[in-house]
Image (tube, coloured by chain):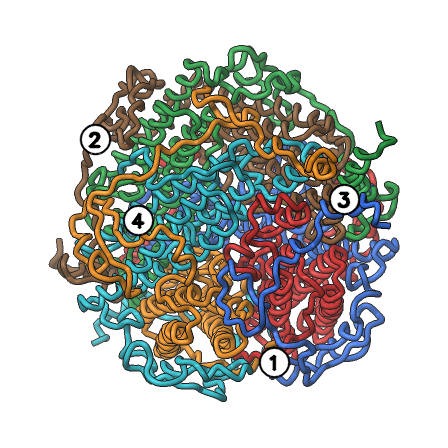
Chain colours: A green, B brown, C orange, D cyan, E red, F blue
Amino acid sequence: MFRHTDHLQFDVKPEKPDPVYARKLQELIGGAYGEMTVTMQYLFQGWNCRMPGKYKDMIMDVATEEIGHVEMIATMVARLLEGAPATESTKNAAADPVVAAVLGGMDPQQAIVSGGGPTLSDSNGVPWNGRFIVASGNLLADFRANVAAEAQGRVQTARLYHMTDDPGVKDMLRFNLARDTYHQNLWLAAIEELQADGIEPSPIAPNALFDEEHSEHASSLWHLSDGAASDQGRWAHGTGPDGTTPMSFLADPVPLGDVASAPPPDPKLYATYDGSQGKPRSAAMGTEKGLVGKVKDALDPDNP
Amino acid sequence: MFRHTDHLQFDVKPEKPDPVYARKLQELIGGAYGEMTVTMQYLFQGWNCRMPGKYKDMIMDVATEEIGHVEMIATMVARLLEGAPATESTKNAAADPVVAAVLGGMDPQQAIVSGGGPTLSDSNGVPWNGRFIVASGNLLADFRANVAAEAQGRVQTARLYHMTDDPGVKDMLRFNLARDTYHQNLWLAAIEELQADGIEPSPIAPNALFDEEHSEHASSLWHLSDGAASDQGRWAHGTGPDGTTPMSFLADPVPLGDVASAPPPDPKLYATYDGSQGKPRSAAMGTEKGLVGKVKDALDPDNP
Amino acid sequence: MFRHTDHLQFDVKPEKPDPVYARKLQELIGGAYGEMTVTMQYLFQGWNCRMPGKYKDMIMDVATEEIGHVEMIATMVARLLEGAPATESTKNAAADPVVAAVLGGMDPQQAIVSGGGPTLSDSNGVPWNGRFIVASGNLLADFRANVAAEAQGRVQTARLYHMTDDPGVKDMLRFNLARDTYHQNLWLAAIEELQADGIEPSPIAPNALFDEEHSEHASSLWHLSDGAASDQGRWAHGTGPDGTTPMSFLADPVPLGDVASAPPPDPKLYATYDGSQGKPRSAAMGTEKGLVGKVKDALDPDNP
Amino acid sequence: MFRHTDHLQFDVKPEKPDPVYARKLQELIGGAYGEMTVTMQYLFQGWNCRMPGKYKDMIMDVATEEIGHVEMIATMVARLLEGAPATESTKNAAADPVVAAVLGGMDPQQAIVSGGGPTLSDSNGVPWNGRFIVASGNLLADFRANVAAEAQGRVQTARLYHMTDDPGVKDMLRFNLARDTYHQNLWLAAIEELQADGIEPSPIAPNALFDEEHSEHASSLWHLSDGAASDQGRWAHGTGPDGTTPMSFLADPVPLGDVASAPPPDPKLYATYDGSQGKPRSAAMGTEKGLVGKVKDALDPDNP
Amino acid sequence: MFRHTDHLQFDVKPEKPDPVYARKLQELIGGAYGEMTVTMQYLFQGWNCRMPGKYKDMIMDVATEEIGHVEMIATMVARLLEGAPATESTKNAAADPVVAAVLGGMDPQQAIVSGGGPTLSDSNGVPWNGRFIVASGNLLADFRANVAAEAQGRVQTARLYHMTDDPGVKDMLRFNLARDTYHQNLWLAAIEELQADGIEPSPIAPNALFDEEHSEHASSLWHLSDGAASDQGRWAHGTGPDGTTPMSFLADPVPLGDVASAPPPDPKLYATYDGSQGKPRSAAMGTEKGLVGKVKDALDPDNP
Amino acid sequence: MFRHTDHLQFDVKPEKPDPVYARKLQELIGGAYGEMTVTMQYLFQGWNCRMPGKYKDMIMDVATEEIGHVEMIATMVARLLEGAPATESTKNAAADPVVAAVLGGMDPQQAIVSGGGPTLSDSNGVPWNGRFIVASGNLLADFRANVAAEAQGRVQTARLYHMTDDPGVKDMLRFNLARDTYHQNLWLAAIEELQADGIEPSPIAPNALFDEEHSEHASSLWHLSDGAASDQGRWAHGTGPDGTTPMSFLADPVPLGDVASAPPPDPKLYATYDGSQGKPRSAAMGTEKGLVGKVKDALDPDNP
């Protein structure tokens, strides 16, 4: 269960309105790597965490903080839109090129739909959606995704930092940059901790099926583009970051598989077919015995 | 420019059809972390790479390989659908519980729309979309995303490995697991290489604006959930993985900001308002001088 | 079955083109509360209505009118785009700030994709989709949604009314405002009628399971944010709008449930787990007897 | 800012796993009227509220409660999936019709993507998105939408109540039903309060532009479908629910507008055209004077 | 403006319920090539048609018919769902494998969301959206799209025809097949008519810019896959279907362009860069003179 | 399997940056008829083709070429963005109307998300998705879709050709126009070839179920809009393009079906119902005998 305090985590005080920038800030609300994404990503990871204790508690701490970040940016957007020339007609706007330029750069839905507030969309007005989050239940894989999300979010924040001169906006972004820095450190530390605790011993892949994979294909770069320098990197020599895998370069790879082809089709599906690959297989499942047959067999006195 | 050979990178030979599994495999084609995602993610990263040479060449090698992975799984899906009871009526199906169960688990669009072949969707039939990829131009942030994508993809492949007994399917998945392992090593190695080359010196955040962020907020976990153990991890003590940041725990955080509030609204937008916060600001941009005024000023002989 | 007359329901004659406004009007075509939404919402409600007679007939009357509203706005958009500077190059546009401002505010797809006509998208170019409509089969719940849709639509229309000076556009919007007013009266009247007819007796919730719900939790506001005034409203005192429920305020709520936790995971799904919650449950369904067992039991002579 | 307690608002204890039902419950997490929708809808309404005091405080109370409802259902889904036959092969599953039926009804992504936990999608696996919420800033219109959302949510919960026999699941749903009942009373009470406070005086439409609309079109049902009974309802007689509007029936409506037509197209857009409507208008904005001209005029000594 | 009659265009009388088939039929309502697509595609083409007369009138005739097809299939879905075991618990369902199989194959939203009726989604429950339609204003290009849509729709209908034994369903589908046949003939005839009328003279491409294109690249198949037979088709020899273009085969194509590369990046965007391509270009637009300068120049007495 | 060369298929050298045009070009990358669509459409058609030989080989040739077209436009976008005023503040921008206009017309995500490169979205920033492609397995229907896609793509390219003065951009578009022309010829030739080979004999509909359709409904235009000229076209007279069907005009059509109605609902779904259509049918499937009964019957000695 959650509780809310009406104080913001950090100050959100723009010096003056800037509706063009209010549109750009939408990227940090509803973009693929905005605050909404990390909020829901961490909440679902926390709720789906199978181990009571430090990992789950930490995830819930950070997730709860992130809801407050959505709140901060949503508040900033509303304040940046104060006094925006939202209801100017095009004719009036065109008479003053400053207003005209602003109108061109605004998000029309912030006026028409939200009445001067934020939407749950990105800077192009595309709505946030639930496929942006990842919560696989595998903490190593998920913490990798968390590092990546914080890194992308921080790069976007740094870009946005240069798109404004407003000291109040910059002050808030300085706080956001710092939290993104800390959270990257945090998730990388958590990966080390998983290894130190022996829960996910390998630094590379979640600890799944190493003994089953075709390991002879787990060490070489297939050279499939004609750029000549791809054998010069760390990825083509020596031992991999996991400490065990030899890394190599396959300079002239040949396909290992047969010719790609689709099988003869079911005629009732009307896929175009000339019969060249023989008759279609009849319904595979239907030709099997099925349960009725199996029950009969099981009860057949002549069937030992 | 690209070229194609009609041989597959690896063999794709199911022992027999399995339309229920064909639906599940769609996750590896059109899911958020399927082959389509890594294909387009690496292509856009390569095309957007600003440095000719080993990084760009390597990215294009891997991207080109991944198109072939989409091809492999698409071929596998078509072969698993061979002889599927796609056009059985419900009545017929219900007469044989095996067929009935299979029908329930199938993707209807693989029959109705694709005529017995794959779609560009995930295992729930939701189409792949372009927001699944990330290509920020910042290679450190992007390689972090690549590690994460390969890790999620490998976990999903490992789960799918246990959902089939078909030796042909398992053989292909063993290859996929191995490539996912290599690619994780590769992207982690590439992160090390970026640092070794001095291009992105910090392991933590893309090297942006460290001097501007509020560094006092870059080191502490805000304790906002009442789970008691979140101070016991590596993330709350010592020095961070970046080698410099002190990590700490803020046990009883208080908000730093003022009360969240939205400003007085433009009356023509009909946001509900009782006047309690004073009169709305009039259109900010419109009150500025505008270009006409500036030009006049510039031409005003009394204006030095 | 439907028929069409080539006369519009109301006049649609802009005084002159305004491509910036043409983009904004897209919100009334393809926005979440645009004409397309009410068209398809009412059509599906009408087709799904289980009672021949006045309700179904009325819904079909209104639904059929709304198709004509899409037609009106689509025609208006095409006329507003007449002579738009759609194929100006950026260089030419930048030479005249009026054109430049207009270009910045236009929807590029109205030119590139539609050739100077409307799209089936909102004012940010995001396509309309089928999840915007609701047709639950429960008329009380659906009429509530209809009131809400008309209210949102009317607010958006009122905002758009202030964004133009064009007398022709304003004339059409005056008609739209009036229809939105009538339709709100209509759906509220229909809710009263459902109650008067005794079909949905409660004004509050669709008449479902009142006797089963935990009624002790159906009357109090949980105070979970620290704003001090939430106990001062009508919602925290007296009897509720349904005429029976006592309304109260829970000033200091405590959670009623246990600790949130996820169970031990299936090891083949590779969710990270340390064993702290015991062994995972084996496949619950698989351990049950299944049909074969049941049939055998049923036929077992020793089984009475 | 938010805080979290690790206790759930209400108990969530299924008696035993039911993976088919776990899929259906997704509708209450990520469906258009699920808990995620009301959470984000109320949060954005609260953050966008322009009046400090009882309305804003109440909205934040309810919004904060709803985050906890997402948590409850997410936890329930994970518990219902415990021991699910997620990694059974189709062959094994088909041997036991009970398992087979369960497999057919499961959401494959709950296993492949989430590792045995919930996703942020609906019962068909379609992701939740930001266009599901409405926060227009107009509280009357928004409270209408809130009543509608709670009514739809309650109907869906009532339907789901009949799809399970599990006493633990039913117990949680009884709580959810009660909260949906209270919240409908609450939002209806809040509408009355807005009127009592004189903030939004009209019960019908948000208080916008009544004096501007074509009021002669605000009172009649256009009879456009041939069902004969649509004049028999409350909506075609007497005075409307707003207490002032006369309600009537337009039995044989004729279109008021001219013929629908699109204007001559810009030839560079290649819309098919035979010249029958005359020459296309040349670029309207470009033919206007533009700023340069206006400045010249303003400075022209011959121009008074 | 539209009118509705409550009689269906054709009979829709299933012999008995079939909820599994009701899900499949959703493809014809809300799929990419379902009735909703052709309805909205033709309506927008008609509204956007620039020529009063036979083309526009014909398009509106067909568009209006298609709304009725959505109505027919929506009604069929509701009837197929009558008596569906929608509210059975999983436990009850699993006791009867017939019910279990049916439950597995059903669309849960048809019960939970629509209360036993259709949704505006495809057979996987993904909502229909506005990007499915095309209305470019160019009738030749649009009629090509219409032929394609009717062809896909007819193939899907033919596949669905084989998935049912119900004589009432088959009867309706026979009507749909016939209309799809006629509509293909119609759109192909309309293409011939456009040419006969001299409005779009070329059968191949909309009549745009033939004189500007690089015609030397308009006639050859680039052989970029190693399959050996692609030179054996009509497309590599003789004269093209447009009657003028020579068709040829480029057996060993080499790229005509330079190396793909992205330019030096703006440093404030933090794209990774080593300086190897020189200094980034400074803001191109900002270095231009701008309007102020131009106005000053224009007013400069020394500037002729 | 694929290989890549780092040379582009054709030159991509803009004379100078144009960030407004860079946004418009996104339509050719990620629009519904952009290069991404034809790439994936042809790849899936090739992979799903059931006939080894000329058709499959040709499809793979073209598909492989199209990946290179995505590469060309993606490279062009990055070059057009060089030196774009991406990180200008609104204040700075508003001081120079040229920059202001450019800022208004830019895609903010090309700066914030991609760091000065392309995204996988259309010109409104809406992401490309997998439902844009069609690969039905029926080559006639798919080649019709391919003609349509190339026709739409060519129209859009022609429109974009007029929106720039840049000779380098125009040069690339001249190549794209030519390829779109060739590919239309190619797909039309391939349709002829399918007929010449006797694989899909009818030019009209994929060769499916002509003998089953209600042929009396396959030849007439239903006149459902009151425009008077729709009987004057080729589609209402003579023999259809398929060479056999008589084409006619149904001037005054009447509905053939009964009244549209939905059946009595399952009471547990709470659809509003007054009992006027009798008692709801009880669960149809559940009333059938089920497998247990059938097995018992099969084993019943008294049951012949």
Quarter of the figure that contains the N terminus of chain F: top right
Observer-nearest of C294 and B130 = C294
Report x, y in % for residue F100.
33, 53
In the image, residue D200 above or below residue A52: below
Give me the C-alpha separation between circle 4 and circle 1. Answer: 49 Å
Which mark is first along the chain, 1 or 3?
1
Report x, y in % for residue E139.
63, 68
Give me the C-alpha separation between circle 1 and circle 2. Answer: 68 Å
Chain identity of mark 4: D
Give me the C-alpha separation between circle 2 and circle 4. Answer: 22 Å
Left or right of C102: which side holds F57? Answer: right
Query: Mark 4 packing: few (<14 Cα in 10 Å), some, or many (20+)?
Result: many
- Amino acid type assigned to the residue bearing label 1 in the image: Ser
Mark in the foreground, 4 or 1: 4
What residue sits right under mark 1 in the picture?
A: F225
Report x, y in % for residue E131.
55, 57
Q: Are marks 1 and 2 on the same chain?
A: no
Chain identity of mark 2: B
Query: Mark 1 packing: few (<14 Cα in 10 Å), some, or many (20+)?
Result: many
What residue sits right under mark 2 in the picture?
A: B253
Q: Quadrant of residue A213?
A: top right
Q: Residue at x 37, y 42 (%)?
A: A36
Report x, y in % for residue C26.
44, 64
**Mark 3 vs 1: CB contact within 8 A:** no
Give me the C-alpha separation between circle 4 and circle 3. Answer: 55 Å
One can see residue B135 in this view: no
Q: Residue at x 68, y 48 (%)?
A: E98
Q: Residue at x 77, y 34 (%)?
A: B16
In the image, residue C232 above or below residue D300: above
Question: Residue F295, labelled with which disc?
Answer: 3
Q: Are marks 4 and 3 on the same chain?
A: no
- Amino acid type assigned to the residue bearing label 3 in the image: Val
